[in-house]
Image: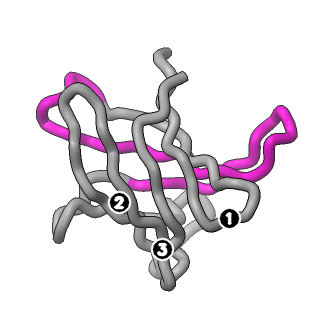
Amino acid sequence: MSVIGHFILGKDGGWTGTIRTLVINAKVRLTPNDNREHDSAPAFRVFLGASRIGDAWEAQAASGHGAYLRVRLDDPSLTEPLTAALFPSDDGASAQLVWTRR
């Protein structure tokens, strides 16, 4: 597992932070999706400036580590979308974005 991002909780219930990989170095924000039409709709939209670059879904860790967000990012420089998990800290004020190779 690699930590590829660090985030802080925003006033709107979303997250703001930076993602850093070999090809990505960007400040992004996860904004709550207030227009969820069905249960499988993303809980958050991921934005880089005004551009939507991905989505995030609420999930529960099977190993008892609690709730997290499944994040999917799309970038033209990648051969396939990047999938990662955003794990909040114990106090809920910050989070780490973790990527694991398939």
Give the farthest residue toward the right.
64
Secondary element at tag 2: strand
Between marks 2 and 1 in the image, the one whose residue lies nearer the viewer: 1
Secondary element at tag 3: strand
Q: Name the residue under label 2.
A: 46
Q: Position of residue 74 (x, y in %)?
A: 26, 42
In this rendered view, identify the residue nearer to me: 20 or 58: 20
Q: In this view, does 92 lie to the left or right of 55?
A: right
Secondary element at tag 1: loop
Q: Mark 3 points at which residue?
A: 32
In this rendered view, identify the residue nearer to me: 55 or 84: 84
User: Where is residue 64, by image quadrant?
Assistant: top right
Residue flagged by tag 3: what amino acid is it? Answer: Pro
Q: Where is residue 87 in the image (x, y as percent from the top left)?
A: 62, 48
Q: Position of residue 99 (x, y in %)?
A: 48, 30
Q: Residue 92: which numbered mark, if any?
A: 1
| Residue neighbourhood size for the residue with mark 1, other residues' Cα within 10 Å, grouped as few (<14), some (14–19), many (≥20) | few
The figure's colour scheme reads one colour
> The N terminus appears in which quarter of the rendering?
top right
User: Where is residue 4, by image quadrant?
Assistant: top left
| Residue neighbourhood size for the residue with mark 2, other residues' Cα within 10 Å, grouped as few (<14), some (14–19), many (≥20) | many
Q: Are marks 3 and 1 in contact (CB under 8 Å)?
A: no
- Distance from disc 2 to disc 3, alpha carbons, whole Å, reads 9 Å
Residues drawn in magenta? 55-80
Tell whether position 42 is magenta: no
| Residue neighbourhood size for the residue with mark 3, other residues' Cα within 10 Å, grouped as few (<14), some (14–19), many (≥20) | some
Q: In this view, does 8 lie above or below 19?
A: below
Residue at 28 percent across and 26 percent down: it is: 80
Residue flagged by tag 1: what amino acid is it? Answer: Gly
